Amino acid sequence: MDYPDFMDASEKWTVTRIRNRKGKGKIVSLTAYDYATARLVDEAGIHLIIVGDSLGMTVLGYESTIPVTMDDMRHHTAAVMRGVKRALVVADMPFLSFQVSVEQAVDNAGRLIKEAGADAVKIEGGAFRAPVVRALVENGIPVMGHIGLTPQSVRAMGGYKVQGRSEEDAQRLKEDAAALEEAGIFSLVLEGIPAGLAAGITSAISIPTIGIGAGPDCDGQVLVIHDLLGMSGDFQPRFVKRYANLGDDMRLAFEAYRREVEDGTFPGEEHCY
């Protein structure tokens, strides 16, 4: 694994290092939800791991992120932390874990930091989330923002639709980014927005942007690991590139195992004591 001169391969990625990387190289991020996967992602040199509430769909079988609970996030974040030595780990704040009050947000974010060991938390929403962000940061909890297509608001948005197409919506997203930066976030996920708008937001703020379906000009990129590995079935969003087709490979392996057990080929003599 080759690392830039300014990076020690064994050095832990911190909030400060991520923030200071803007303009010095792309930030590489993936989701992870368990120990074994997180260990492999970390060993590959990925800078930032997001324990996304996308686990609701990829791991737990829900149709959206909305049913995911704080206990789900705490459990999976703790598992990821046990597999990571270098990457910065950011835990998603699930639906209704921070929306009711600032006090609720501080308490739940504190659980993810204190009980699960997360390095930071991520919350969805624009300028109206600034008071929550500010309270978390003031209490020593680093926050990653998330604007554009925000899955927890998918019902209000009428589905998984690209955001910021109109001039009015684009201006609102620019104002959201500025307000969240002012409130103290260390980085900002831009999801499902036009590439030109993402480029403009990226150049207008001094913190890194992490794009997912937001074009190449963000300061970094993130993908859901099940999408990258070809484990999400036939559905493939436009912004996803599959780097493997493990779903097909796994199915073939399972079928081969079934056949060999049924016909008595496995276990063979070499598998016996």
Image (cartoon, rainbow, N blue to C red):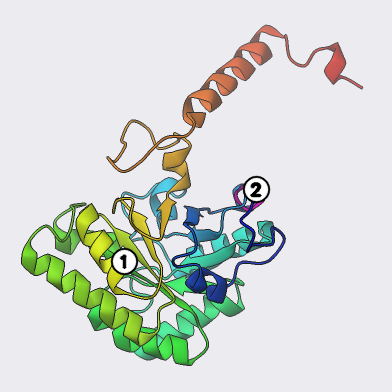
- Residue occupying image coordinates x 55% and y 27%: 250
| Left or right, 42 with reference to 146 | right
The local secondary structure at tag 1 comes to: helix
- The kind of secondary structure the magenta stretch mainly shows is helix
Q: Position of residue 140 (x, y in %)?
A: 53, 88
Q: Quadrant of residue 89?
A: bottom right
Q: Quadrant of residue 166?
A: bottom left
- Residue occupying image coordinates x 49% and y 65%: 73
Q: Looking at the image, which residue sits at the far front? A: 5
Q: Is residue 181 above or below residue 1?
A: below
Q: Nearer the viewer, residue 45 or 249?
A: 45
Mark 2 — residue? 2
Q: Is residue 17 magenta?
A: no
Q: Nearer the viewer, residue 58 or 169?
A: 169
Question: Which stretch did the figure color magenta?
Answer: 39-43
**Which amino acid type corresponds to the residue marked 2 in the rendered image?**
Asp
Q: Is residue 75 above or below residue 179?
A: above
- Residue occupying image coordinates x 54% and y 74%: 15
Q: Position of residue 187 (x, y in %)?
A: 41, 71
Mark 1 — residue? 202
